[in-house]
Image (tube, grey):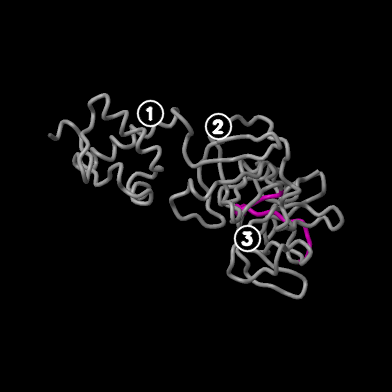
Amino acid sequence: MVAIGDYNELEIIKQVDFGIYLDSDDGEILLPQKYVPEDFRVGDFLRVFIYRDSEDRIIATTLQPKAKVGDFAALEVKQTSNYGAFLDWGLEKDLFVPFQNQREKMQPGKKYVVYVYLDENSDRIVATAKYEKYLDKEPEGLAEGDQVNLLIAGFTDLGIKVIIDNRYLGILYKNEVFRRLEVGDETTGFIRKIREDNKIDVSLQRSGYAEVPDAAGQILQKLKAAGGQLPVTDNSSPEAIYEALGMSKKTFKKAVGSLYRNGTVELHPNYISLKSQQ
């Protein structure tokens, strides 16, 4: 069967005035003329995204949506109605979020993290902001120190909720974040701790000694680019250090200490410098 809400490789079987038809186990599927590549030939295979149009017909497109079935994504509300909200996901037909799938009443112009799925009853692609039940509860294949992809999902009193590798829920603690993050931001992080209850703590930098070589190399690169001096020291604020180097003050102190001990940098009251500059 054709995978609705996902990419499919389908064969071109004929051309008509308004597009081309692709072969599938569910019958012929139209790719409208505006999406037909110029150099196509009958018999070629095309990679297309399959969804339902405004008349509920299965249709193909070469556009790439911002999310497919099985994905978590932060999408903006285009409009609302008496039935729910409609999200911009990069296709002509907006993605529908029924009222019962909303955590709070969605507002036009605002972004929300949602999970995209195929509704079993209607066979239509819909989204839900109540995404927790679609996350994996057992962190299989994850280990402390692993580098992972993070999607910023929301904010709590404790910290920032993140979706890890499109599979797990994790948290970034407030006291370890020194840059502005917003819902929908995507960034790289590291598994800091996997707790006995399978809750996952993450950080934006490697933990422990493993972070020092990378951070030291980053400081050296910044020093060279800045002509040999940087206006940060052990006494600088965490925000100033993060703005200058993109790392926490704790990591900065470890890395600078390492560079100082091996004779690479000099420490001054208001700045650090490469030793060769002295």
**Which mark, residue 76?**
none
**Would you place residue 259 above or below residue 22 in this image?**
above
Dot 1 amino acid type: Pro
Q: Position of residue 54 (x, y in %)?
A: 74, 66
Give the residues in magenta: 55-69
Q: Nearer the viewer, mark 3 or mark 1?
A: 1
Q: Nearer the viewer, mark 2 or mark 3?
A: 2
**Would you place residue 19 above or below residue 106 in this image?**
above
In the picture, the quarter occupied by the C terminus is top left
Q: Position of residue 57 (x, y in %)?
A: 78, 60
Q: Position of residue 89 (x, y in %)?
A: 62, 59
| Mark 1 nearby-residue class (10 Å; few <14, some 14–19, many ≥20) | some
**Which mark, residue 146?**
2
Q: Main secondary structure of the magenta part?
A: loop
Q: Which mark is first along the chain, 1 or 3? A: 3
Relative placement, left or right, of 206 versus 56 is left
**Which mark, residue 112?**
3
Give the residue furthest to the top.
262
- Element type at marker 3? strand
Q: Which mark is first along the chain, 2 or 1? A: 2
Residue at coordinates 70% horizontally, 44% vertically from top-left? 8
Where residue 42 sits, quadrant-wise, is top right
As measured in the structure, the alpha-carbon distance from the residue carrying label 1 to the one carrying label 2 is: 16 Å
